[in-house]
Image (cartoon, rainbow, N blue to C red):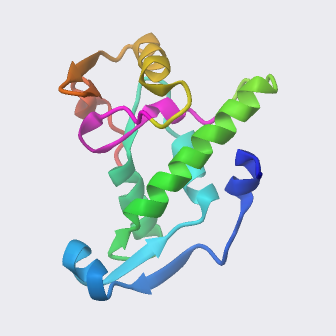
Amino acid sequence: MKSWSEKLKEKKDLPKVVKITGKMSKRWGTGTVVIPAPLEVDKIMKKVPKGKLITINEIRKKVAKKHKATIGCPITCGIFARIAAGVAEEEKKQGKKRITPYWRTLKLGGVINEKYPGGVAGQKKLLEKEGHKVVKKGKKYIVLDYEKSLVRV
């Protein structure tokens, strides 16, 4: 099985911009979608400073703008953010101090991504340490007033 680091470095002919067609157009409209390279998503996540946050949607906007596409692919951007989080945990276990601060990357609506290392509890602790307030809303955990801490793209 591949390590997170190996997955992050895979190129797979990415990034690539493709026309939105067929079933995709029902959901995403018309235009083009960029499928970024995993390292591009990681690079954006690495730049989020302590006390600040970003959402997957903001990352999608950033890659779309960079590649002059209509949208950034919601599926691959989410998968690549998860891979970046996995790499960060691998590096932390190896004693590396400067890792990708994946806990600062939230889902739409300020929701904590339960699939990231440490699950909700681990990220909640890291976010609270940086001054954010995390609350339970239904079954999800959200960062209260997350909009005020967003890094603009």
Q: Is residue 128 visible?
A: yes
Of residues 70 and 153, the one nearer the viewer is: 70
Describe residue 152's horizontal placement relative to residue 36 as left or right: left
Describe residue 148's horizontal placement relative to residue 84 as left or right: left
The residue at the far front in this view is 1
Residue under the image location 34 percent in, 42 percent down: 107
Q: Is residue 99 visible?
A: no
Residue under the image location 69 percent in, 29 percent down: 98
**Is residue 111 on the magenta stretch?**
yes
Q: Magenta stretch: give its range.
A: 99-114
**Is residue 152 on the magenta stretch?**
no
**Residue 94 x %, y %:** 81, 27
Residue 5 in the image: above or below residue 125: below
Of residues 141 and 64, the one nearer the viewer is: 141
**Residue 145 x %, y %:** 21, 26
Place residue 28 in its image quadrant: bottom left
Residue 133 in the image: above or below residue 104: above
Residue 35 in the image: above or below residue 105: below
